[in-house]
Image (cartoon, rainbow, N blue to C red):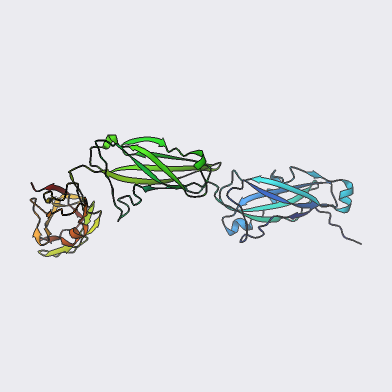
């Protein structure tokens, strides 16, 4: 006698048989196509039900899904599928397919449990598949300024250089910028603002030049600087690219710093922080600290001709005061190349070339020394001093 199983039989054809080897969805896939077959010798009506659950631990994976499968209404056959008596008699294999939407499913590892049940509440064995769902929001785009310089100065990027814009202010109040960008979607937008114009403005790119998935050029013609034409401040332009798809958006940024040359002028950039470190002093003792750590550089800008008078660099140093107690003052003396610094002059600089930017950072670090004296009491804490730098000609 041939034994015929009176329970529904189920076979799932998807990959992803184990937790360690799941089926990996692609970011652009919006549906998981669950498909397979069933057959039943005992009943005409069979419902292929499923659950989908995120797996965050071994306990999640071991949880029994039977009761949830019986109670929920998720069906790969959209309710009970019917077969004829003839098909039932021979156990004809019936196919099923269900596109499971992923719109409400975040990135992660998921376990799909599938079970066939008939109207007599007889069930098949539970079949499981594992699916890894990636983030479907677009990848972060990028944008970079390459012209007029691709090494723009930044406080957060030691070693970068501030771009000095040389223009004839009598006849010019704009300059051009250009660079590259990359978006991973076809729907993207590039905008720009500046520290003196906060209104976002769209960077227009011709439709024929729009590309996705690879590096492409952009350009901004005639950027207007009339508003800041006559100051010597550091300015910046912010570029932003946003790309979008149906799951969200992502941003990329770049900032370009510049300063406008002032004819026949002198300028100075000084370090933001000069750190002499931490020292231990016994009462009535003295210590000398050299080669401080610096954040930022000492640059002299001289837009005069090379026959101009030497530049005098002055430095005014205020008392070193404890950060939390203004009554605690440290006894210090500051020296430049073994000479005590006075308000009169720190350094005299002769211009003998046609260059306009001069880096004195190493000279400052190698020649600057701080002498600290302690009195009868030991002073503890963090002390800071405010320094004022000035560059002017010697006339």
Could you tell whether 256 is left or right of 273 in the image?
right
Quarter of the view holding residue 203: top left
Location of the N terminus (image quadrant): bottom right
Q: Where is residue 121 in the image (x, y as percent from the top left)?
A: 78, 48
Residue 262 versus residue 10 in the image, above or below: above
Whether residue 65 can be seen here = no
Q: Can residue 147 be seen in this view?
A: yes
Q: Is residue 270 left or right of 311 when viewed as pictured?
A: right
| Horizontal and vertical percent position of residue 282 | 14, 65
* Whole-percent x, y for residue 76 in the image: 72, 46
Q: Where is residue 54 in the image (x, y as percent from the top left)?
A: 59, 52
Q: Above or below — where is 115 with respect to 174? A: below
Between 255 and 248, the residue placed more toward the observer is 255
Q: Residue at x 66, y 46 (%)?
A: 100
| Residue nearest the viewer, comparing 385 with 61 | 385
The tally of labels here is 0
Between 190 and 208, the residue placed more toward the observer is 208
As drawn, is 41 to the left or to the right of 59? right
Q: Which residue lies furthest to the right in this view?
A: 1
Say which residue appears at 59% left-offset and 43% top-offset. 104
């Amino acid at each position: 006698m041939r034994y015929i199983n009176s329970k529904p039989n189920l076979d799932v054809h998807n990959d992803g048989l184990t937790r360690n080897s799941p089926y990996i969805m692609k970011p652009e896939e919006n549906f998981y196509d669950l498909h397979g077959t069933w057959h039943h010798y005992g009943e005409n009506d069979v419902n292929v039900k499923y659950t989908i659950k995120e797996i965050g631990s071994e306990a999640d994976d071991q949880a029994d899904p039977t009761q949830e499968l019986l109670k929920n209404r998720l069906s790969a056959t959209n309710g009970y599928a019917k077969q004829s008596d003839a098909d039932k008699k021979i156990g004809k294999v019936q196919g099923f397919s269900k596109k499971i939407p992923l719109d409400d499913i975040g990135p992660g590892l998921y376990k799909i449990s599938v079970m066939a049940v008939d109207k007599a509440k007889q069930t098949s064995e539970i079949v499981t598949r594992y699916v890894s769902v990636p983030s479907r929001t677009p990848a972060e785009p990028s944008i970079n300024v390459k012209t007029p310089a691709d090494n723009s100065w930044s406080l957060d990027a030691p070693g970068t250089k501030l771009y000095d814009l040389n223009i004839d202010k009598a006849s010019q109040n704009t300059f051009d910028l250009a660079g590259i960008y990359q978006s991973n979607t076809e729907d993207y937008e590039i905008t720009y603002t500046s520290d003196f114009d906060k209104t976002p403005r769209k960077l227009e790119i011709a439709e024929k030049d729009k590309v996705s998935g690879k590096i492409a050029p952009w350009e901004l013609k005639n950027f207007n600087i009339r508003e800041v034409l006559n100051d010597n401040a550091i300015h910046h332009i912010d570029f932003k690219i946003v790309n979008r798809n149906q799951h969200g958006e992502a941003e990329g940024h770049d900032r370009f710093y510049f300063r406008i040359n002032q004819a026949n002028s002198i300028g100075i950039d000084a370090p933001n922080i000069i750190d002499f470190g931490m020292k231990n002093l016994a009462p009535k003792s003295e210590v000398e600290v050299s080669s401080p750590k610096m954040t930022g550089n000492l640059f002299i800008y001289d837009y005069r001709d090379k026959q101009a008078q030497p530049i005098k660099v002055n430095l005014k140093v205020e008392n070193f005061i404890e950060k939390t107690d203004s009554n605690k003052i440290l006894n210090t003396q500051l020296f430049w190349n073994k000479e005590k610094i006075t308000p009169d002059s720190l350094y005299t600089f002769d211009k003998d070339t046609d260059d306009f930017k001069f880096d004195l950072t190493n000279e400052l670090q190698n020649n600057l020394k701080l002498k600290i004296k302690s009195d009868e009491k030991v002073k503890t804490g963090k002390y800071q001093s405010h320094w004022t730098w000035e560059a002017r000609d010697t006339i």
